[in-house]
Image (cartoon, rainbow, N blue to C red):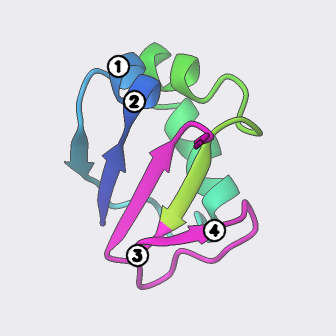
Amino acid sequence: MKLVYFAWVRERIGRPEEELTPPPAVATVADLVTWLRGRGEEYAYAFADPDVVRAAVDRVHAKADAPIAGAGEIAFFPPMTGG
């Protein structure tokens, strides 16, 4: 699946996107974040407070318990503000 990172999440990880195949036990957005945190210090830093990072599964905002099976793209980004 394609993972896309935006804003400071991208800066902390050091890349805008990547293709990864998580293990079968990774079933939700929260599982994916936990798995990513174990991939290295840059991921641990980006996801240090997973409650702050937002996710979208195939361009639809998703909560931590959202399933990721069959997803083509998962994006991670900080909370957005507007005005």
Residue pointed to by mark 2: 7
Is there CB contact under 8 Å for labels 4 and 3? no
Query: Farthest front residue?
Result: 83
**Structural crowding at the residue carrying mark 2, measured as other residues with C-alpha within 10 Å and reported as few (<14), some (14–19) or many (≥20):** few
Hey, what amino acid is under mark 1?
Answer: Glu
* Residue wearing tag 1: 11
Residue 71 lies, in percent from the top left, at: 41, 78
Label 4: which secondary element: strand
Q: Which residue is mark 3?
A: 58
**Does the magenta-highlighted stretch encompass residue 52?**
no
Kind of residue at badge 2: Ala
Q: Which secondary structure, mark 1?
A: helix
As measured in the structure, the alpha-carbon distance from the residue carrying label 3 to the one carrying label 2 is 18 Å
Marks 3/1: CA–CA distance: 22 Å
The kind of secondary structure the magenta stretch mainly shows is loop
Query: Magenta segment range?
Result: 57-83
- Tell us which disc is closer to us: 3 or 2: 2
Residue beneath disc 4 = 62
Q: Earlier in the sequence, mark 3 or mark 1?
A: 1
Query: For the point 42% across and 55% down, which residue is it?
Result: 75
Q: Is residue 37 left or right of residue 30?
A: left
Looking at the rendered image, the disc whose residue lies closer to the viewer, 4 or 2, is 2
**Residues at discs 2 and 1 in contact (Cβ within 8 Å):** yes
Position of 2 with respect to 44 (left or right) is left
